[in-house]
Image (cartoon, rainbow, N blue to C red):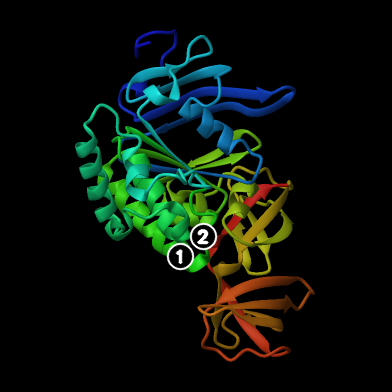
Amino acid sequence: MNATSGPGLIEPIAAAGLVLADIHHAFGRNTVLKGVDLSVAPGEIVCLLGPSGCGKTTLLRLAAGLETLQQGRIALSGRLVSTPAETLPPEDRRVGLMFQDFALFPHLTVLDNVAFGLRGHSAEIKRQTARALLQRVGLAGVANAYPHLLSGGEQQRVALVRALAPQPQVMLLDEPFSGLDARLRDQVRDQTLAILKEQGVATLLVTHDAEEALLMADRIALMEAGQLSQTGPAEELYFRPLSPFVAGFFGELNRLEGKASNGSVETPFGRLPCPGIADGRGVQILIRSEGFNATEKDKGVPTRVERVRFLGPINLVEARLSQGTTFRARLRPGQALNVGQPLWLTLDPRYSFVFPS
């Protein structure tokens, strides 16, 4: 196949590292992908984010050539590699794969694991390349060890450099950090991000962890029930969500009801804009718990503290308004907070969203 074969080839196909166009897929009667369009540029990291069962891993496996494409087109670096009529085998796609179980060969040393995917080179060149990559991630000292002797973080780094050794044009990662403890996860994610950026490959990373996507992605593609709900930079999805689903995926929300009037809606914390929603129509008001600020007496909305939980950098406060509505606020420590005491709050409207009911 070549990049000009097949009808209706989309424009970005020549420039993007990975292009997935109009992807549909079903397992029997269960439709798991419904017209997904997504591209990843060389050097870009796109996080495919969403709840379990929304189709993320299926899309990744289609990109890798591990599933047969039923409808749509897939291209890698300008080359059409999958149509319903023809599919290029995974080993011929120049794609690096890394899954959550790492899949290291237990009978091979770390060095031989990394060298395994290098084809068309002498044994010595393979070993030199593998040593250089292990040196890059601080694992030169365990080159002759076997995988079962390594920690989870070390195994993860070995799996990463093994995938990068053949210099792939596209990297596909499926929940690669899910098996690591929280403290190690941050360290390994930072190392992985640095290496991927250094290599400049187009990277599609599957995760269900919104914080992980915010940390790593140049763009986030959020999936819901086999479709992309919104794609864009992290700040765009966080501050300008297109739906309640998108808003709720990036943190806890307080939910209120109201009615639109003259392009805005009345809330206990003042009016919020809701342009384009007809007067009298019911709306749902979503307020992030981090959107509140404590202020001096009589300079905000009066509430009463119901519960306080210290969470290190923030206090999670449950407060009640005079009319009885209870909500949660994440406030910076500093002000002494006790159950039953009054608390005056202001709202940052950037953390509030209004949608039709």
Q: Secondary structure at mark 2?
A: loop
In three-dimensional space, the C-alpha distance between marks 1 and 2, rounded to whole angstroms, equals 6 Å
Give the residue at the far right of this rendering.
Answer: 324
Whether residue 282 is visible here, answered yes or no, is: yes
In the rendered image, the vertical position of residue 349 relative to residue 325, given as above or below: above
Q: Amino acid at mark 2?
A: Leu
Whether residue 235 is visible here, answered yes or no, is: no
Give the residue at the far front of this rendering.
Answer: 107
- Marking on residue 184: 1
Q: Which residue is the site of mark 2?
A: 180
Give the residue at x 34% y 46%.
161
Please state the horizontal and vertical placement of residue 304, each as a whole percent of the image: 71, 83
State if disc 2 and disc 1 touch (CB < 8 Å): yes
Q: Amino acid at mark 1?
A: Leu
Are there few (<14), some (14-19), or many (20+) residues within 10 Å of tag 2? some
Determine whether, in the image, residue 237 is placed left or right of residue 308.
left
Determine whether, in the image, residue 171 is placed left or right of residue 273.
left
Q: Secondary structure at mark 1?
A: helix
In the rendered image, the vertical position of residue 280 relative to residue 18, given as above or below: below
Give the residue at x 58% y 32%.
58
| Observer-nearest of 140 and 199 | 140
Please state the horizontal and vertical placement of residue 237, each as a whole percent of the image: 50, 49
| Observer-nearest of 86 and 164 | 164
In the rendered image, the vertical position of residue 222 relative to residue 288, given as above or below: above
